[in-house]
């Protein structure tokens, strides 16, 4: 005899025989997953609805849904915390190490500029560091080349640190000889006696209100300042120390006195300048 069975009745009976209570951990996992899982979206071309289903279809889909629900609960319940699977805490990504900026090196302490020197030949005065001394003074004007060219008769003033081989300042001046200040300074920094291996790096500077420039002579990094006022050019060299900012501090103390500079001696046989008629 064929017995007609209602699919809804069979499904209800199967559910009554199965487990009626889920573990608390499974409930919590399902609740968390339900709250946090984004719902899918689709393009809205019309009403979003399911098609009508007959009783047999409802039975089959219901059974599949119950089985999937039960298996999902068991999977969540058995998941190991921290394993990276659903239900366990996800592993936080490892952060890349951030390099902290290196602390700026503290500037080297410099002695105070307590000394004072005025040249009797070149018409210039300057302050120099504590512990330095005037090593020698010029005895005649500087005329050609670099001041070193007129030794043993010295045509430059030199202020040096007490220890042998330490840095020194060298001062000299000469008439521009009909050149502009820019022309004269370019000629000086390109003197062969510097033995430069590359063109000098220059930057403008003002010394005692007069125009000038700082030139770095390679390969030794000799700091050279040149300035000009009236018809006189001035040369100031810091040798043995490449601290340009400290050099600028020294240059800030310079005072120019072109009216006090000694004039070069007239060359033998030179005709005196004609006087006013």
Image: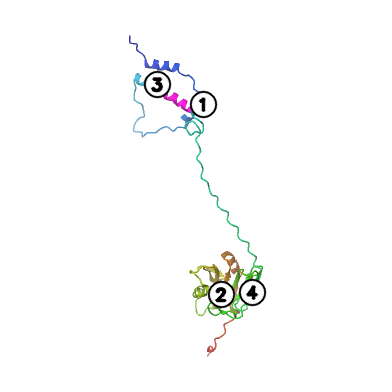
Q: Is residue 78 magenta?
A: no
Work out whether mark 1 precedes mark 3 in sequence or the reverse, and give the earlier one: 1
Q: Main secondary structure of the magenta part?
A: helix
Residue 234, which numbered label?
Answer: 2
Give the CA distance from mark 1 to mark 3. Answer: 24 Å
For the point 56% across and 75% down, the residue is 234
Residue 231 coordinates in the image, percent (x, y):
54, 78
- The answer to whether the residues at label 4 and label 3 have Cβ atoms under 8 Å apart is no
For the point 40% across and 17% down, the residue is 11
Report whether residue 25 is seen: yes
Give the CA distance from mark 2 to mark 4. Answer: 19 Å
**Mark 4, residue position:** 135
Residue 25, which numbered label?
Answer: 1
Q: Residues within 10 Å of mark 1 (few under 14, many from 20)?
A: some
Residue 63, which numbered label?
Answer: 3
Give the CA distance from mark 4 to mark 3. Answer: 107 Å
Residue 241 coordinates in the image, percent (x, y):
58, 66
Q: Residues within 10 Å of mark 4 (few under 14, many from 20)?
A: some
Residue 57 figure quarter: top left
């Amino acid at each position: 005899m064929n017995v007609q069975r209602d699919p809804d009745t069979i499904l209800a009976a199967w559910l009554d025989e199965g487990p009626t209570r889920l573990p608390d951990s499974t409930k919590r996992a399902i609740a968390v997953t339900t709250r946090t899982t984004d719902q899918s979206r689709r393009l809205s071309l019309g009403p979003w609805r399911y098609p009508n289903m007959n009783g047999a279809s409802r039975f089959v889909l219901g059974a599949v849904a119950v089985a999937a629900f039960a298996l999902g609960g068991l999977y969540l319940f058995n998941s190991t915390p921290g394993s990276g699977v659903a239900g366990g805490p996800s592993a936080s990504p490892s952060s890349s190490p951030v390099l902290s900026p290196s602390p700026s090196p503290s500037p080297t302490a410099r002695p105070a500029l307590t000394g004072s020197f005025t040249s009797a030949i070149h018409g210039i005065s300057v302050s120099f560091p504590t512990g330095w001394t005037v090593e020698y003074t010029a005895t005649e004007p500087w005329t050609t080349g670099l001041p070193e060219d007129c030794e043993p008769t010295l045509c430059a003033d030199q202020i040096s640190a007490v220890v042998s081989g330490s840095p020194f300042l060298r001062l000299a001046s000469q008439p521009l000889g009909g050149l502009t200040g820019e022309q004269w300074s370019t000629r000086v920094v390109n003197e062969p006696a510097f033995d430069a291996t590359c063109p000098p790096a220059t930057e403008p500077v003002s010394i005692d209100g007069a125009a000038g420039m700082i030139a770095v002579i390679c390969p030794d990094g000799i700091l050279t300042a040149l300035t000009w006022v009236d018809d006189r050019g001035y040369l100031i060299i810091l040798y043995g120390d490449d601290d340009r900012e400290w050099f600028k501090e020294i240059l800030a103390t310079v005072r120019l006195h072109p009216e006090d500079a000694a004039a070069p001696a007239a060359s033998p046989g030179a005709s005196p300048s004609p006087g006013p008629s």
